[in-house]
Image (cartoon, rainbow, N blue to C red):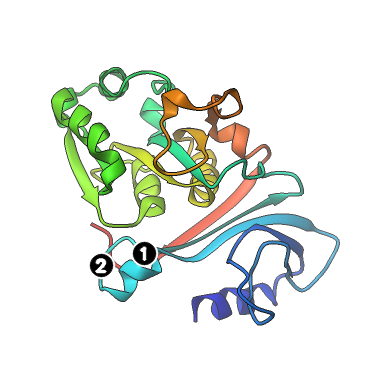
Amino acid sequence: AAVEAMELSFKAVKISGHIIIGEERIDERSKLCVGDTIGAGGEAAFDIVLDPVDCIEALADGQSNSISAIAMGQRGTFRELAAPCMRKIVVGAEAADAIDLNASVFDNLVRIADAKRVYVEDLTVSILDRERHRKLIDEVRRAGARIELLKAGELAAAISASLPETGIDVMMGVGDAKQGIIAAAAAVCLGAGLQVQFMPGPDADPEGLPEAFRKIYGARDLVGTDVMFAATGVSRSD
């Protein structure tokens, strides 16, 4: 239903939209897939990244943090996905210049706390509850920060970390690269801080990656020009 609703809304918009990130194409009936053109047509040409429903399985189970999101910009706005996964750190505008994905978890939390003029113990870090994050969770706990463990909803968590007064100061961890691009669009619009590293898989060791995966990207590296972003909650968010 979310796919049909989003597709229907675009039929009234006089643009020529090209989907860069979208739904997986299962058969000829699939809609809003990568490579599809949407919109009512016109001279205005846009690249579009979208997710009609992020973490749909969690929604089906009655869990929180399901979200619908879309971003659009001029052709060539969004960086192509170099790998299926990303290691990410996201913070709000106050700490946008304080993060460094190459630094340790402890150093990042200290810098973020300094930028926000609070103690590390006052920070809350949002992390997906996955086995691959055991080391990250241990490091955050040793630093003294609080943790919000999520069953699902990394896109909602990234947006929460980008906004003030949500109770989430930082989002960290490895997740889907598609959500990373959408989160970068949100970060650009909100003036938030985001850094990512492409990963060949969710369990890859960042320190053992080949040179092609060593580069760290900021939000502006992923979203190169002015961009429009919109999101709406589908289920409740804690």
Label 1, residues with CA under 10 Å away: few <14, some 14-19, many ≥20: many
For mark 2, give the secondary structure: loop
Tell me where residue 14 appears, x and y as whole percent: 76, 69
The quarter of the picture where residue 8 lies is bottom right
What amino acid type should be assigned to the residue bearing mark 1? Answer: Ser
Quick check: 165 above or below 6?
Answer: above
Residue 39 in the figure: left or right of residue 179: right
Residue 121 in the figure: left or right of residue 27: left
Tell me where residue 213 appears, x and y as whole percent: 56, 29
Image quarter in which the C terminus is found: bottom left
Between 206 and 177, the residue placed more toward the observer is: 206
Do residues under tags 2 and 1 come within 8 Å of each other at their CB atoms?
Answer: yes
For mark 1, give the secondary structure: loop
Q: Which mark is residue 208?
A: none
Residue 185 in the figure: left or right of residue 151: right
Between 153 and 214, the residue placed more toward the observer is: 214
The quarter of the picture where residue 203 lies is top left
Res. 144 in view: no
Residue, disc 1: 66
Q: Farthest residue in the right direction?
A: 43
Res. 104 in view: yes
Label 2, residues with CA under 10 Å away: few <14, some 14-19, many ≥20: some
- Residue at the image point whose x is 54% and y is 39% from the top: 188
Between 227 and 209, the residue placed more toward the observer is: 209
Residue, disc 2: 63
Quick check: 226 above or below 2?
Answer: above
Tell me where residue 189 appears, x and y as whole percent: 53, 43
Count of number-bearing discs: 2
- Residue at the image point whose x is 45% and y is 25% from the top: 208
What amino acid type should be assigned to the residue bearing mark 2? Answer: Gln
